[in-house]
Image (cartoon, rainbow, N blue to C red):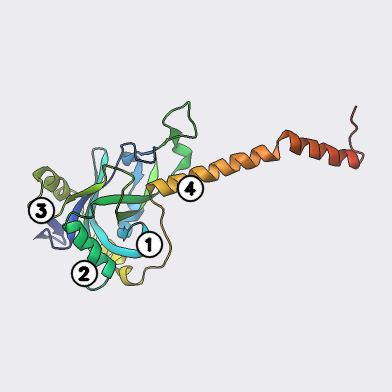
Amino acid sequence: MQRFFSGDIEALGDREIGVIAATSNVARDGHVIEINGLNLNEYRKVPIVLYQHDSSQPVGTATSLGVVGNALAARIQFAPPGISVVADQACALCKAAILRGISIGFDPDWSTAEPLDPKKPRGGQRFRKSELLEISVVSIPSDTGATVVQRSFGGREDFRRLIERLPPISRPSIERAAAKLPRHAGGRILSHAGHVWTLLQIAEQKREEQKRRYSRQARKADLERLRARGAVNFH
């Protein structure tokens, strides 16, 4: 595999992998992300790669990124040896084909979401537009098509060519992401499944709150209060 960076050509390094970060297939959580509607602009400015969606454990950067068909592909470079124990372990596990899952953290545009089945509006959603926040190396991806596809120069030819053709991310952007590696703030960025589940839970809570607010019992209580004030009479 070749890596294009600052005009030079280098063979795939000991701390680099090629991945499919996400697809437009139905994920394990029952939802779909339209890859062609995924905004990559802000991510390209700080192309961080995390471990298990934990923002306190950044492990590398994406050096190139692009949409190929219905998939988001990327080339990932792990942090230099010794900077992060987690990065060292993640790199070694990926290279050994033990850790293979890849996942993304994203911010969906809820206004463009629509149910996959109109008869089940609270079921699986299709997110037509969303923003990429981060890419993570994970144990169990929500998207079964998101995986490490290239670990060395001698991998599959079709995947090698796919990764080679990806648009490179600018050096300043990579440096901005790399600068975050030793001192990244704590907190978590939700995974595909976690983010969608949280949004659905919030929507459900709002619906339940609205039901309680306008239930028959609530309306009766309001009328009782009005009657006590002499504002209304029952017949």
Residue at the spot 24% in from the left edge and 48% down from the top edge: 147
In the image, what residue type sits under mark 1? Ser
Q: How far apart in space, not on screen, are marks 3 and 4 (Cα)?
A: 39 Å
The mark nearer the N terminus, 1 or 4, is 1
- Return the x and y of residue 148 as percentages of the image width and height: 21, 50
Q: Is residue 16 above or below residue 102?
A: below
Look at the numbered discs 3 and 4 and tell me whether their residues touch, using CB distance below 8 Å.
no
Which element type, helix, strand or loop, lies under badge 2? loop
The mark nearer the N terminus, 3 or 4, is 3
Q: Is residue 207 above or below residue 148?
A: above
Residue at the spot 90% in from the left edge and 41% down from the top edge: 228
Q: Residue furthest bottom?
A: 82
Question: Mark 3 Cα within 10 Å, few/some/many (few <14, many 20+)?
Answer: many
Residue at the spot 48% in from the left edge and 39% down from the top edge: 111
Which element type, helix, strand or loop, lies under badge 1? strand
The mark nearer the N terminus, 3 or 1, is 3
- Return the x and y of residue 7 as percentages of the image width and height: 13, 60
Q: How far apart in space, not on screen, are marks 4 and 2 (Cα)?
A: 35 Å
Q: Which residue is denoted by mark 2 in the rendering?
A: 80
Q: Which residue is denoted by mark 4 in the rendering?
A: 198
In the image, what residue type sits under mark 4? Thr
**Which numbered disc covers residue 55?**
1
Residue at the spot 13% in from the left edge and 63% down from the top edge: 14
